[in-house]
C-alpha cells in the first residue's frame, strides 16, 4: 500500500475563520499571502484580506502552498466540551480548504500526508519529551486507528450492525470517530488531537514517527482499530462497553500491570476496585515523569487515577435537565445496571419523582453527569439523605480518565520508562496483535 493522504477538519461550524498565510498560497490563477478572514456567503465562501476587502468568492476555496509555506489559524477551539476547553493559535503545513458547513458556518480542512499528520498527533496527544519507546508505540497505534478508519469507507459506515434493541425507558448512544461528512477526521479529542507543527520542534515525536514509518498493528490480516485513552485506572475496558455490542479480541480488558487483577463482575467488586489503590503502571506518583509525559493542558488534571465529584441534589437535577432535556423532578437515585470489567458503567438508571430513565453508553453517562464530562464512567454513588429519606447530596467516587479501551497512555509511558520496548507495550494492551510494515 502507498502512504495515504488525510483530510483533517481543524475548524468546524465557525461563523468566520481568521488566519494568516505564511508564504505564498495559490488557488486557480490567484496567489495569496498574509492575514485573511474567511466567511460563509450563502452557498459559497468569501475570502477577505486584512483590510476587509473581498478577494475571492467561490463554492469552496482550495489553497496550495507555493514551496514550503505554512498557514496559521487564530482562535482554534481545542478540548471541545471537555474541562480543559480553550482557544489557541495554531500553525499547519499542507493544503487548506474552506467549505460551507451549513447554517451560516464554514469549515477549514487541512490536507496532508499521513506520516506528517502523525508527527503532530503524537506531539499533541502527549509530550514529545516522553520516553522514546512510548512515542514509537503511540505512533503505531495512532497510525493503525487512522488507516483502519479510512479503510472502512462510507459503504461500511452505512451498513453497520443494527443498533441495540432498547427497552422502554432506555436511552443508549455512542459516538463513532468516523462520523464526519466534510473531512476524514477532526483535530480534537473526538478523533485524535492534531494541533499543528509547533509541538514537533520539541522532543522526539517526529523521530518516533519516522522510525516506525508504515508499521501497523495487525490482527487476523487486518489493520487494528487501535483505540487509546489517558489513564485506565488499573484495568482497561472492553470495546462493547463504549461502542457497539461487538467483541473485538484485541480491544478486550487487560490489567495495567504485570500482575493480573480480576475484572469487576459485581457491584461489590466495582466498589472494592474503585476504592482501592492497586499497584499498576498508570498510578504513577512521579511528578517529573508526568511533566515529561503530559502536554501542559493535561497537567492541570492531577486526580486522574482516583477522583471524586459531589453535587447538591438540586444542582444535579438542574444539570441532568440541561444535559438530557428530561425533567426528572426530585432526584431519588443513581443506580448502575451494567458495568464493564474495569468498573465503567455502560447502563445507569436515573430515578426521579417525574421520570426514570436508563442511560448509556459510557460517554453519554459522563456527559449527563457533568457540566463538561466526568473523567470516566467508572464510579460508585453514595447519597446523603434527610430524615425523610430524600437525598440532599450525591457523591461520585471514580477511577481513571477516558473510555479505558485499548492503550492506556500514562500506563504505556510508565512502561517505557521502566524499560519496556514499543513492541512489548503494544502487545500488552492489544492482545493477539502483531506489528507489520505495510509501506
Image (spheres, rainbow, N blue to C red):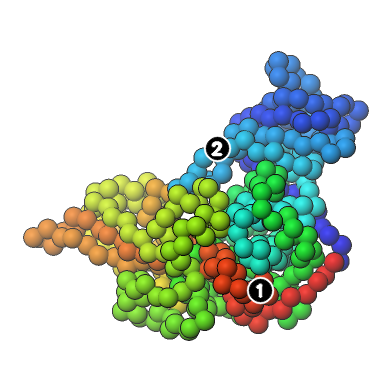
Q: Is residue 411 above or below residue 260?
A: above
Residue under the point 69% across and 26% down: 37
Q: Are marks 1 and 2 in contact (CB under 8 Å)?
A: no
Q: How many marks?
A: 2
Q: Which mark is residue 18?
A: none
Residue at which label 2 appears: 87
Q: Is residue 287 visible?
A: yes
In front: 362, or 410? 410
In front: 56, or 194? 194
Q: CA distance from mark 1 to mark 2?
A: 36 Å
In front: 134, or 377? 134
Q: Is residue 125 above or below residue 15?
A: below
Residue at which label 1 appears: 421
**Residue 88 on image: x %, y %:** 58, 37
**Splitting the image into 4 quarters, where does residue 1 fall?**
bottom right
Q: Is residue 76 left or right of residue 93?
A: left
Amino acid at each position: 500500500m502507498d502512504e495515504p493522504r488525510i483530510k483533517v477538519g481543524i475548524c468546524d461550524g465557525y461563523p468566520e475563520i481568521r488566519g494568516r498565510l505564511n508564504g505564498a498560497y495559490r488557488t486557480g490563477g490567484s496567489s495569496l499571502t498574509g492575514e485573511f478572514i474567511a466567511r460563509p456567503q450563502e452557498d459559497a465562501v468569501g475570502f477577505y484580506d486584512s483590510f476587509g476587502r473581498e478577494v475571492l468568492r467561490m463554492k469552496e476555496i482550495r489553497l496550495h502552498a507555493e514551496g514550503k509555506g505554512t498557514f496559521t489559524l487564530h482562535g482554534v477551539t481545542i478540548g471541545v466540551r471537555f474541562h480543559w476547553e480553550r482557544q489557541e493559535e495554531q500553525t499547519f503545513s499542507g493544503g487548506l480548504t474552506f467549505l460551507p458547513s451549513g447554517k451560516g458556518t464554514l469549515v477549514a480542512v487541512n490536507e496532508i500526508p499521513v506520516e506528517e499528520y502523525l508527527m503532530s498527533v503524537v506531539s499533541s496527544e502527549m509530550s514529545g519529551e516522553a520516553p522514546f519507546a512510548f512515542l514509537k508505540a503511540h505512533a503505531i497505534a495512532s497510525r493503525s486507528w487512522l488507516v483502519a478508519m479510512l479503510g472502512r469507507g462510507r459503504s461500511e459506515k452505512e451498513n453497520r450492525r443494527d443498533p441495540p434493541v432498547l427497552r422502554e425507558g432506555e436511552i443508549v448512544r455512542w459516538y463513532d470517530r468516523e462520523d464526519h461528512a466534510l473531512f476524514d477526521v477532526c483535530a480534537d479529542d473526538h478523533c485524535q488531537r492534531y494541533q499543528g507543527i509547533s509541538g514537533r520542534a520539541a522532543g522526539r515525536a517526529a523521530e518516533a514517527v519516522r522510525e516506525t514509518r508504515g508499521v501497523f498493528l495487525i490482527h487476523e490480516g487486518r489493520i487494528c482499530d487501535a483505540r487509546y485513552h489517558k489513564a485506565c485506572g488499573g484495568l482497561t475496558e472492553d470495546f462493547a462497553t463504549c461502542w457497539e455490542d461487538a467483541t473485538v479480541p484485541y480491544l478486550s480488558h487487560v490489567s495495567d500491570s504485570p500482575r493480573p487483577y480480576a475484572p469487576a463482575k459485581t457491584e461489590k467488586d466495582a466498589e472494592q476496585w474503585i476504592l482501592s489503590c492497586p499497584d499498576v503502571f498508570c498510578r504513577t506518583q512521579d511528578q517529573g515523569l508526568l511533566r515529561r509525559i503530559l502536554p501542559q493542558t493535561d497537567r492541570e488534571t492531577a486526580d486522574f487515577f482516583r477522583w471524586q465529584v459531589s453535587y447538591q441534589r438540586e444542582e444535579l437535577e438542574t444539570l441532568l435537565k440541561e444535559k438530557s432535556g428530561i425533567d426528572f423532578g426530585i432526584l431519588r437515585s443513581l443506580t448502575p445496571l451494567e458495568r464493564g470489567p474495569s468498573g465503567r458503567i455502560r447502563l445507569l438508571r436515573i430515578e426521579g419523582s417525574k421520570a426514570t430513565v436508563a442511560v448509556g453508553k459510557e460517554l453519554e453517562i459522563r456527559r449527563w453527569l457533568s457540566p463538561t464530562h466526568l473523567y470516566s464512567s467508572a464510579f460508585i454513588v453514595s447519597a446523603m439523605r434527610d430524615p425523610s429519606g430524600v437525598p440532599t447530596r450525591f457523591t461520585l467516587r471514580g477511577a481513571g480518565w477516558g473510555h479505558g479501551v485499548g492503550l492506556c497512555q500514562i500506563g504505556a509511558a510508565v512502561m517505557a520508562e521502566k524499560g519496556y520496548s514499543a513492541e512489548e507495550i503494544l502487545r500488552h494492551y492489544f492482545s493477539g496483535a502483531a506489528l507489520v510494515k505495510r509501506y
